[in-house]
Amino acid sequence: MTTLAFTNARLVLANETRPGALLVRNGLIAAVGTVDLPGDVETIDLGGELLAPAIIDLGVFAVDMAACHAGGIVRIGLMPDQAPVLDDPGIVQRSALIGRPGLWIHPIAAATKALAGKDLAEMAINRDAGARAVGTGRGWIADAGVMRKVLGYAHDLGLVVIAHAEDGGLAAGAVATEGETATRLGLPAAPAIAEALAIARDLMLAEETGARLHFRQVTTATGFALIRAAKARGVAVTCGITPAHLMLSDIAMTDFRSFAHLSPPLRGEADRQAALAALADGTIDVLASGHDPRGPEEKRLPFADSAPGMAGAETLLALGLGLVRDEYLTLARLFALLAGNPARLLGVSAGVLAPGMPADLVVINSDTPWQVSAETLIGRAGNTPFDGLPVQGRAVQLFKGGTRLR
């Protein structure tokens, strides 16, 4: 394979961003920083642009290669909510292979058969077939006894459990969070405490079993307080969030904008501010797109009848860079949230610029201005709640294992 050198780069490293070069040999990173270039090297002069680990998007609902590549993503943690559900080793194995070599899919196998929340799926066989985690999907396992078994079995197998955090009894049929906006629009709503109730129960079970537990999205002040307290007493818990819950409140649903129909639903402004505080203080471990492309047949409906979800893969990087410019976090921390931490959760050797790691790289022009447009996103659908938002920063080159994808 070609030896490749990136020079005149701003390297996004684990703890800092600094100028330097990066050498790739045989698909792996060979050297970072001050690099002696061999005679046969192919050189790419980046002219001061950012060179960062390519994004690992944890918790994607659809394989959407075009959207991922546009957003600087080369690996995804695929949610089990597929057709068919990822609860069988053959299905898990096929899903792990369908995107290669351009997109590596790390399946999150269903914790229970058909995601029904009753009988445990064959976790050990699914792990051996390629599953990198097990998950509850879009729903919550209501039976505490079943969830305890899921956590205990996953602990014994060395797998993290990726859980949805909404009490199903309170959230059933709801499309919004209780509050002024939901009342004014007349939408079926659930109290924000539905999240905290689910988190509290699952934290207690994780603490008892010793299991690793990741809440795919935490979005409320009470939820973050529970996570902080659990981390402080040593529970192996992590949590994620999407840009939507950091940047938008339930006011975005005004005029029944179905692109703002998400799961979990958008919260009140106080919870949004709590999410930004949790991002700044390190409570949040993962920033993910929640990519769930939905076409007009599912979104161009009355709000309560529309499907929840947003297309997020193409906008994740630009929105994350906006959080850096607003000084909620550093570039190094952003890429820990986008790549390093997801890699650790999935048990993948990737996500950082370090010798021996796969050369999964994204070159970023952080100054490029553009406007998010539902009509021009190149993925499977354009159902973004950020339609019309001016942003800054784009992935301009993308490499998987040293091979250029764009």
Image (spheres, helix red, strand yellow):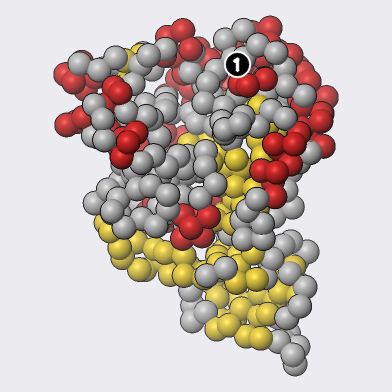
Could you tell me the amino acid type at mark 1?
Ala
Residue 295, image x and y in percent?
A: 36, 41
Count of marks placed on residues? 1
Nearer the observer, 327 or 275: 275
Q: Quadrant of residue 19?
A: bottom right
Nearer the observer, 86 or 141: 86
Residue 285 visible in rendering: no
Instruction: Classify residue 164 as left or right of residue 354.
Output: left
Q: Residue at x 75, y 92 (%)?
A: 39
Q: Secondary structure at mark 1?
A: loop
Residue 122, image x and y in percent?
A: 77, 24
Residue 171, image x and y in percent?
A: 41, 14
Residue 126, image x and y in percent?
A: 77, 32
Nearer the observer, 58 or 338: 58
Image height of 78 relative to 363, above or below: above
Instruction: Classify residue 88 as left or right of residue 400.
Output: right
Q: Dot 1 surroundings within 10 Å: few (below 14), some, or many (20 or more)?
A: some
Instruction: Classify residue 65 as left or right of residue 27.
Output: left
Image height of 105 relative to 15, above or below: above
Q: Residue at x 60, y 72 (%)?
A: 404
Image height of 150 relative to 58, above or below: above
Which residue corresponds to mark 1?
116
Instruction: Classify residue 301 as left or right of residue 9.
Output: left
User: What quarter of the picture does the N terminus occupy?
Assistant: bottom right
Q: Residue at x 71, y 74 (%)?
A: 24
